[in-house]
Amino acid sequence: MLASLLCWVGAVGVADASQHVLTLHRGDTVLVEVLDADGQHVTVRHPVFGEVAVPLDDIASLQQAPQQAPQQVASASPASEPAGGVSQISARPGAATAPPAVDRAGRSPEAGRPQEPPPPPAAPAAAPAPAPAPEPEPEAVPWKGRLGAAFTGSQTTQTTYNLRLSGRLYRTAPESRTDLSVSYYLNSADGNITDNDLLARGEQNWLNPESEWEVFVQSTYQYDQFEAWAHRLSPYGGLGLQLVQEDDFMLNVKGGGGVTWEQGAGLVRPQALFEVEVNWKIDELQSLAGYSSIAPDVENPADFLATIKWDWRLRLGKESPLALNIGVREIYDSTPGSGANHSDFKLWAGVTWDF
């Protein structure tokens, strides 16, 4: 077989340096050009390793490649090496020495098997959507306050003095309005107390920014040393309607119901309530504020309790917390009871301090 191979190579391979398929006994197949042959070696040119002398004992077959054959033959998995190792291909003098084995693709095992192309880089993970910024908490609406004092005195045929002290706390938020006030009156003539009167009022309004309607509760407490009832408490509740809401003018009307309790008389009178409230900023220095209300008895409307309270203020400067104050208050009871007065009228002039 070797003689036939040499004769074939001498007749075809050397004369025609075309592409040949060289198959080794261990199964490797390479595509080469045959350059020369003798009794021991076949010299070939490999596109990677150059000229290599391959021992005849290692060659299984040598065939001319077809005209349309691909430039490289797909490689099969190399067979396992025998226990004694792989036969070495010795190079003739001046020829390149072949590596111990050549796979079908023309690469040495030491060069590593063909590597698959690296997978495309993974698309970067989408950044998580930023968490929505927390809504800012609404700022707390501060309380505002006012203190007032009025004092008069005279000495003629008798010595008299009148004292009025007042205080107020209030705040207005988009959804509520709170107002707490108290006033105290003390009058004396020749050392005898002629008036000792305390009036406290609290009101809470729940507003709806999208509506003109509001819900309110209010309560009034009065102490009068010289009235038969001594202590009187009047809680009410109901609905309010904002007729006018401007920066410099507010007009509200309210309607509801409640009761009036008189401690000295031992009476509880169920009543309806109707009230008009005004707050008018006349100019940068002047303002007028107050309310008028009437609470008729539910069973006998001719029996009623009416209250009027109005304050005019003149600030002593655009930035000054001080203001001159003139006010009037009237509480009229249609059925005051034995020994009591129908009317409790107060008029004062004094100064107030805002804080």
Image (tube, helix red, strand yellow):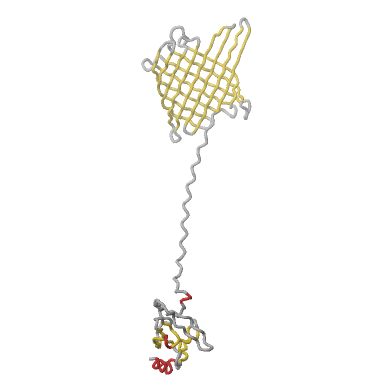
Q: Residue at x 52, y 29 (%)?
A: 171
* Residue situated in front as seen by the camera: 307 or 148: 148
Residue 69, quarter of the rendered image: bottom left
In the orientation shown, which residue stands out farthest toward the left? 299
Q: Residue 46: image x %, image y %? A: 47, 84
* Residue situated in front as seen by the camera: 194 or 26: 26
In the orientation shown, which residue stands out farthest toward the front? 84
In the orientation shown, which residue stands out farthest toward the top? 157
Q: Residue 276: image x %, image y %? A: 46, 24
Q: Residue 245: image x %, image y %? A: 49, 31
Does 37 sit left or right of 317 as displayed? left
> Vertical placement of 253 versus 36: above or below?
above
Q: Residue 292: image x %, image y %? A: 47, 21
> Vertical placement of 31 versus 117: above or below?
below
Does 281 sit left or right of 257 as displayed? right
> Image quadrant for the N terminus?
bottom left
Residue 195, quarter of the rendered image: top right
* Residue situated in front as seen by the camera: 337 or 232: 232
